Image (cartoon, helix red, strand yellow):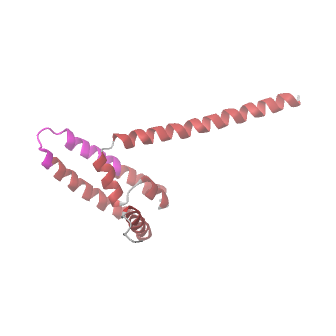
């Protein structure tokens, strides 16, 4: 009887652990795919604005804020995709429209965040810039 209980408990733990690992790896794969689909300019623009996944995690967003930000980002992706697929526009016109959209998205995002959250992003951007800046000769 004891063996049966130990066997069932072990089996339950094994199934639970493997399922949890599967869910984590699936999320990671999806996120990597989404990021790889972004062009390098988009990644760079988001990083410049301080709007990265890690920065958003550090902001302690409310559920409502997270939902609104995801809607804004999805809307922006859709609009940019429409522009990039519009064959009537020149590359320069596409870039101009995308810049306008990014500015609008930044304003929308900024309107959702609190002053404290905006300050955290600002501090994080400064910290990141310091890391990227080349060391001064002689130090």
Residue 22, given in percent of the width and then of the height, sits at 57, 35
Residue 67, given in percent of the width and then of the height, sits at 42, 52
**Occupied quadrant, residue 105:** bottom left
Residue lying farthest to the right in this orientation: 1
Residue 36, given in percent of the width and then of the height, sits at 37, 41
Decide which of 59, 108 is in the foreground and name it. 59
Residue 117, given in percent of the width and then of the height, sits at 43, 66
Q: Is residue 76 visible?
A: no
Q: Is residue 17 left or right of residue 109?
A: right
Please state the extent of the stretch shown in magenta in the rendering: 73-93
Decide which of 132, 108 is in the foreground and name it. 132
Residue 83 sits inside the magenta stretch: yes
Position of the N terminus, as image quadrant, is top right
**Occupied quadrant, residue 10:** top right
Q: Residue at x 24, y 53 (%)?
A: 101
Position of the C terminus, as image quadrant, is bottom left
Decide which of 62, 4 is in the foreground and name it. 4
Residue 6 sits inside the magenta stretch: no
Q: Is residue 98 left or right of residue 112?
A: left
Q: Residue at x 44, y 38 (%)?
A: 30
């Amino acid at each position: 009887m004891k063996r049966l209980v130990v066997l069932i408990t072990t089996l339950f733990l094994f199934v639970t652990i493997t399922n949890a690992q599967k869910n984590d790896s699936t999320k990671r794969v999806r996120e990597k795919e989404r990021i790889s689909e972004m062009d390098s300019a988009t990644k760079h623009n988001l990083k410049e604005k301080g709007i990265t996944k890690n920065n958003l995690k550090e902001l302690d967003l409310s559920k409502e804020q997270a939902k609104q930000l995801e809607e804004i980002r999805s809307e922006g992706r859709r609009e940019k995709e429409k522009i990039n697929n519009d064959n009537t526009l020149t590359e320069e016109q596409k870039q101009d429209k995308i810049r306008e959209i990014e500015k609008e998205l930044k304003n929308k995002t900024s309107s959702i965040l609190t002053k404290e959250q905006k300050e955290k992003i600002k501090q994080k951007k400064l910290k990141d810039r310091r890391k990227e800046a080349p060391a001064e000769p002689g130090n």
